[in-house]
Amino acid sequence: MKNVWIGIRALFACLSLLLGCMFYSAHRNLLKTHRMKVKSSTKVDSQLTVFFISDVHRRRIPTKLLDKVQTRSSSVDLVIIGGDVAEKGVPLKRVKSNVEKLSILGPVYYVWGNNDREIGESNIREIIEGVGGTILDNESVRIPTHPDWILSGADDPSSGNTNLQKAVSFDHEYMHQLIAVHNPSLFNKLLQISRPELLLGGHTHGGQIRFGPFGMQPRGEFKDEKEHAQLISNGFGTTLIPLRFGAPPETHLIKIEYKKRSETSRHA
Protein backbone atom coordinates (compact mmCIF):
# COMPACT_ATOMS: atom_id res chain seq x y z
CA MET A 1 0.00 0.00 0.00
CA LYS A 2 2.88 2.33 0.81
CA ASN A 3 4.29 1.86 -2.68
CA VAL A 4 0.89 2.68 -4.18
CA TRP A 5 0.77 6.00 -2.34
CA ILE A 6 4.32 6.79 -3.41
CA GLY A 7 3.31 6.07 -6.99
CA ILE A 8 0.22 8.27 -6.72
CA ARG A 9 2.24 11.14 -5.27
CA ALA A 10 4.88 10.79 -7.99
CA LEU A 11 2.17 10.80 -10.66
CA PHE A 12 0.54 13.86 -9.12
CA ALA A 13 3.89 15.65 -9.02
CA CYS A 14 4.54 14.83 -12.67
CA LEU A 15 1.10 16.02 -13.70
CA SER A 16 1.53 19.24 -11.71
CA LEU A 17 4.88 19.86 -13.38
CA LEU A 18 3.40 19.20 -16.82
CA LEU A 19 0.48 21.57 -16.19
CA GLY A 20 2.90 24.20 -14.93
CA CYS A 21 4.99 23.87 -18.10
CA MET A 22 1.85 24.07 -20.25
CA PHE A 23 0.65 27.19 -18.46
CA TYR A 24 4.07 28.81 -18.80
CA SER A 25 4.23 27.92 -22.49
CA ALA A 26 0.81 29.48 -23.11
CA HIS A 27 1.99 32.84 -21.74
CA ARG A 28 5.25 33.25 -23.60
CA ASN A 29 5.77 36.29 -25.86
CA LEU A 30 7.59 34.91 -28.88
CA LEU A 31 8.29 37.19 -31.83
CA LYS A 32 9.40 35.43 -35.00
CA THR A 33 11.12 37.38 -37.75
CA HIS A 34 10.63 36.27 -41.36
CA ARG A 35 12.37 37.68 -44.42
CA MET A 36 11.28 37.29 -48.00
CA LYS A 37 12.14 38.82 -51.34
CA VAL A 38 9.59 39.39 -54.07
CA LYS A 39 10.73 37.12 -56.88
CA SER A 40 10.08 39.65 -59.65
CA SER A 41 12.50 42.12 -58.09
CA THR A 42 15.67 42.53 -60.14
CA LYS A 43 17.16 44.96 -57.65
CA VAL A 44 15.91 45.41 -54.11
CA ASP A 45 15.55 49.02 -53.03
CA SER A 46 12.63 49.00 -50.60
CA GLN A 47 11.30 47.04 -47.65
CA LEU A 48 7.73 46.55 -46.48
CA THR A 49 7.55 45.66 -42.78
CA VAL A 50 4.48 43.88 -41.41
CA PHE A 51 3.64 42.90 -37.84
CA PHE A 52 1.11 40.06 -37.75
CA ILE A 53 -0.78 38.80 -34.70
CA SER A 54 -3.81 36.52 -34.55
CA ASP A 55 -5.94 34.72 -31.99
CA VAL A 56 -5.35 36.95 -28.99
CA HIS A 57 -8.55 35.70 -27.35
CA ARG A 58 -8.28 36.34 -23.58
CA ARG A 59 -4.63 37.36 -23.35
CA ARG A 60 -3.31 40.81 -22.59
CA ILE A 61 -0.76 42.37 -24.91
CA PRO A 62 2.33 43.04 -22.75
CA THR A 63 4.52 46.10 -23.22
CA LYS A 64 7.60 43.88 -23.51
CA LEU A 65 6.19 42.41 -26.74
CA LEU A 66 5.91 45.90 -28.21
CA ASP A 67 9.47 46.59 -27.06
CA LYS A 68 10.69 43.49 -28.91
CA VAL A 69 9.06 44.64 -32.13
CA GLN A 70 10.46 48.15 -31.86
CA THR A 71 13.91 46.80 -31.09
CA ARG A 72 13.94 44.65 -34.22
CA SER A 73 12.45 47.24 -36.55
CA SER A 74 12.62 51.02 -36.41
CA SER A 75 9.24 51.27 -38.15
CA VAL A 76 6.29 49.05 -39.01
CA ASP A 77 4.20 49.77 -42.09
CA LEU A 78 1.26 47.54 -41.18
CA VAL A 79 -0.10 45.97 -38.01
CA ILE A 80 -2.40 43.18 -39.17
CA ILE A 81 -4.73 41.60 -36.62
CA GLY A 82 -5.69 38.26 -38.09
CA GLY A 83 -8.97 37.71 -36.26
CA ASP A 84 -10.11 36.47 -32.86
CA VAL A 85 -8.95 39.52 -30.99
CA ALA A 86 -11.69 38.52 -28.52
CA GLU A 87 -14.18 35.84 -27.57
CA LYS A 88 -17.27 35.56 -25.37
CA GLY A 89 -16.59 36.74 -21.83
CA VAL A 90 -13.56 38.91 -22.59
CA PRO A 91 -14.04 42.39 -21.08
CA LEU A 92 -14.34 45.12 -23.71
CA LYS A 93 -11.86 47.17 -21.70
CA ARG A 94 -9.20 44.49 -22.24
CA VAL A 95 -9.87 44.24 -25.97
CA LYS A 96 -9.72 48.02 -26.30
CA SER A 97 -6.45 48.17 -24.36
CA ASN A 98 -4.92 45.43 -26.52
CA VAL A 99 -5.84 47.14 -29.77
CA GLU A 100 -4.61 50.51 -28.51
CA LYS A 101 -1.25 48.97 -27.61
CA LEU A 102 -0.91 47.37 -31.04
CA SER A 103 -1.71 50.69 -32.70
CA ILE A 104 1.45 52.13 -31.13
CA LEU A 105 3.47 50.02 -33.56
CA GLY A 106 1.78 51.27 -36.73
CA PRO A 107 -1.48 51.53 -38.71
CA VAL A 108 -3.93 48.77 -37.74
CA TYR A 109 -5.71 46.54 -40.25
CA TYR A 110 -8.12 43.89 -39.04
CA VAL A 111 -9.95 40.83 -40.41
CA TRP A 112 -12.80 39.06 -38.63
CA GLY A 113 -12.25 35.80 -36.76
CA ASN A 114 -14.84 33.18 -35.89
CA ASN A 115 -15.09 34.29 -32.23
CA ASP A 116 -14.95 38.10 -32.45
CA ARG A 117 -18.65 38.75 -32.92
CA GLU A 118 -19.36 36.94 -29.64
CA ILE A 119 -18.71 40.26 -27.86
CA GLY A 120 -20.78 42.22 -30.38
CA GLU A 121 -19.90 43.29 -33.91
CA SER A 122 -20.58 46.94 -33.15
CA ASN A 123 -18.17 46.80 -30.19
CA ILE A 124 -15.36 45.42 -32.35
CA ARG A 125 -16.00 48.04 -35.02
CA GLU A 126 -15.93 50.83 -32.46
CA ILE A 127 -12.65 49.58 -30.95
CA ILE A 128 -10.86 49.22 -34.30
CA GLU A 129 -12.16 52.51 -35.63
CA GLY A 130 -11.23 54.16 -32.32
CA VAL A 131 -7.53 53.75 -33.17
CA GLY A 132 -8.03 54.84 -36.77
CA GLY A 133 -7.82 51.23 -37.89
CA THR A 134 -9.26 49.65 -41.02
CA ILE A 135 -11.61 46.66 -40.99
CA LEU A 136 -11.18 44.68 -44.19
CA ASP A 137 -14.78 43.67 -44.93
CA ASN A 138 -14.13 41.66 -48.11
CA GLU A 139 -12.10 44.44 -49.64
CA SER A 140 -8.66 45.58 -50.76
CA VAL A 141 -6.89 48.81 -49.84
CA ARG A 142 -3.70 50.40 -51.03
CA ILE A 143 -0.86 50.50 -48.52
CA PRO A 144 -0.14 54.25 -48.13
CA THR A 145 3.59 53.98 -47.44
CA HIS A 146 4.09 51.43 -50.24
CA PRO A 147 1.70 52.38 -53.07
CA ASP A 148 2.85 49.48 -55.29
CA TRP A 149 1.14 47.16 -52.77
CA ILE A 150 -2.45 46.42 -51.79
CA LEU A 151 -3.72 44.57 -48.73
CA SER A 152 -6.78 42.35 -49.15
CA GLY A 153 -8.91 40.84 -46.41
CA ALA A 154 -11.97 38.59 -46.28
CA ASP A 155 -14.58 37.95 -43.61
CA ASP A 156 -14.47 34.62 -41.78
CA PRO A 157 -16.51 31.73 -43.24
CA SER A 158 -18.38 31.36 -39.93
CA SER A 159 -20.15 34.66 -40.61
CA GLY A 160 -21.70 33.54 -43.88
CA ASN A 161 -20.52 36.87 -45.33
CA THR A 162 -17.33 35.72 -47.03
CA ASN A 163 -16.88 37.06 -50.57
CA LEU A 164 -13.41 36.14 -51.79
CA GLN A 165 -13.78 37.56 -55.28
CA LYS A 166 -14.79 40.92 -53.88
CA ALA A 167 -12.04 40.74 -51.27
CA VAL A 168 -9.20 40.40 -53.77
CA SER A 169 -10.58 42.84 -56.37
CA PHE A 170 -9.10 46.31 -56.75
CA ASP A 171 -10.13 48.92 -59.31
CA HIS A 172 -6.73 50.57 -59.72
CA GLU A 173 -3.30 49.43 -60.83
CA TYR A 174 -0.87 47.83 -58.40
CA MET A 175 2.16 45.59 -58.44
CA HIS A 176 1.99 43.39 -55.35
CA GLN A 177 -0.66 41.96 -53.04
CA LEU A 178 -0.87 40.75 -49.45
CA ILE A 179 -3.92 38.76 -48.35
CA ALA A 180 -4.99 38.32 -44.73
CA VAL A 181 -7.73 35.96 -43.57
CA HIS A 182 -8.41 34.31 -40.25
CA ASN A 183 -8.94 30.77 -41.49
CA PRO A 184 -6.16 29.37 -43.72
CA SER A 185 -8.62 26.88 -45.21
CA LEU A 186 -9.35 29.76 -47.62
CA PHE A 187 -5.80 29.86 -48.99
CA ASN A 188 -6.32 27.43 -51.86
CA LYS A 189 -9.49 29.19 -53.02
CA LEU A 190 -7.73 32.55 -52.90
CA LEU A 191 -4.83 31.24 -54.98
CA GLN A 192 -7.30 30.22 -57.68
CA ILE A 193 -8.53 33.80 -58.16
CA SER A 194 -5.49 35.94 -57.26
CA ARG A 195 -1.69 36.03 -57.31
CA PRO A 196 -0.60 37.31 -53.91
CA GLU A 197 3.00 37.57 -52.82
CA LEU A 198 2.01 36.59 -49.27
CA LEU A 199 -0.95 34.93 -47.57
CA LEU A 200 -1.49 35.34 -43.81
CA GLY A 201 -3.75 33.29 -41.51
CA GLY A 202 -4.18 31.93 -38.00
CA HIS A 203 -7.13 30.13 -36.39
CA THR A 204 -5.54 26.70 -35.91
CA HIS A 205 -3.42 27.60 -32.83
CA GLY A 206 -0.93 25.06 -34.21
CA GLY A 207 -3.04 22.45 -32.44
CA GLN A 208 -2.42 24.31 -29.12
CA ILE A 209 -1.59 21.04 -27.33
CA ARG A 210 0.43 18.58 -29.33
CA PHE A 211 2.93 15.83 -28.64
CA GLY A 212 5.64 15.76 -31.25
CA PRO A 213 3.99 15.37 -34.66
CA PHE A 214 0.60 14.61 -33.12
CA GLY A 215 -1.95 17.37 -32.71
CA MET A 216 -5.50 18.37 -33.60
CA GLN A 217 -4.12 20.82 -36.19
CA PRO A 218 -0.79 21.16 -38.03
CA ARG A 219 1.88 23.26 -36.36
CA GLY A 220 2.01 26.82 -37.70
CA GLU A 221 4.74 27.66 -40.20
CA PHE A 222 6.09 30.20 -42.66
CA LYS A 223 6.70 28.84 -46.17
CA ASP A 224 8.35 30.81 -48.94
CA GLU A 225 7.35 28.90 -52.05
CA LYS A 226 8.18 29.48 -55.70
CA GLU A 227 5.26 31.74 -56.60
CA HIS A 228 4.21 33.03 -53.19
CA ALA A 229 4.83 32.80 -49.46
CA GLN A 230 2.34 31.87 -46.77
CA LEU A 231 2.24 32.13 -43.01
CA ILE A 232 -0.06 30.15 -40.74
CA SER A 233 0.48 31.34 -37.18
CA ASN A 234 0.15 29.38 -33.95
CA GLY A 235 -1.57 32.52 -32.66
CA PHE A 236 -0.96 34.47 -29.49
CA GLY A 237 -3.69 33.31 -27.12
CA THR A 238 -5.54 30.13 -26.23
CA THR A 239 -9.10 28.92 -26.38
CA LEU A 240 -11.09 26.68 -24.03
CA ILE A 241 -8.14 26.16 -21.65
CA PRO A 242 -5.18 28.50 -20.97
CA LEU A 243 -2.60 25.83 -21.77
CA ARG A 244 -0.19 25.06 -24.61
CA PHE A 245 2.26 22.29 -25.29
CA GLY A 246 4.36 21.71 -28.38
CA ALA A 247 2.80 24.75 -30.13
CA PRO A 248 4.04 27.89 -28.36
CA PRO A 249 2.26 31.21 -28.92
CA GLU A 250 3.83 33.46 -31.51
CA THR A 251 3.66 36.80 -33.25
CA HIS A 252 5.42 37.72 -36.46
CA LEU A 253 7.55 40.48 -37.94
CA ILE A 254 7.72 40.04 -41.71
CA LYS A 255 10.24 42.00 -43.76
CA ILE A 256 9.52 41.97 -47.49
CA GLU A 257 12.22 43.22 -49.83
CA TYR A 258 11.19 44.36 -53.29
CA LYS A 259 11.94 46.72 -56.14
CA LYS A 260 9.96 49.93 -55.95
CA ARG A 261 8.59 51.12 -59.26
CA SER A 262 7.09 54.47 -60.17
CA GLU A 263 4.56 53.00 -62.61
CA THR A 264 2.46 49.93 -61.90
CA SER A 265 1.02 47.75 -64.57
CA ARG A 266 0.53 44.30 -63.11
CA HIS A 267 -2.82 42.86 -61.87
CA ALA A 268 -5.35 44.85 -63.86
Image (cartoon, rainbow, N blue to C red):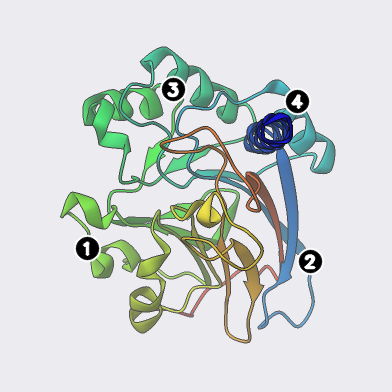
Q: Secondary structure at mark 4?
A: helix
Vertical position of residue 117 compared to residue 130: above or below: below
Viewer-proximal residue, 33 or 48?
33
Q: Which one is closest to the eye, mark 3 or mark 1?
A: 3
Q: Mark 4 belongs to which amino acid?
A: Lys
Between discs 4 and 1, the one toward the N terminus: 4
Residue topped by disc 4: 64
Instruction: Please provide percent x and percent y for residue 217.
Output: 48, 62
Which-is-in-front pick, marks 2 and 4? 4
Q: Can you tell which mark lies on residue 95?
A: 3
What is the spatial separation of the Cα atoms under label 2 and label 3, in whole angstroms? 37 Å
User: Is the residue under label 3 in contact with that under label 4 (CB below 8 Å)?
Assistant: no
**Three-letter amino acid code at the position of disc 2:** Asp
Q: Position of residue 135 (x, y in %)?
A: 35, 41
Which comes before the other along the chain, label 2 or label 3?
A: 2
| The label number, if any, that marks residue 45 in the structure image | 2
Q: Nearer the viewer, mark 4 or mark 1?
A: 4
Residue 62 location (% of width, % of height): 66, 23
Which residue in the structure is indicated by mark 1?
A: 163
Label 2 neighbour load within 10 Å: few <14, some 14-19, many 20+:
few
Q: Residue at x 66, y 53 (%)?
A: 246
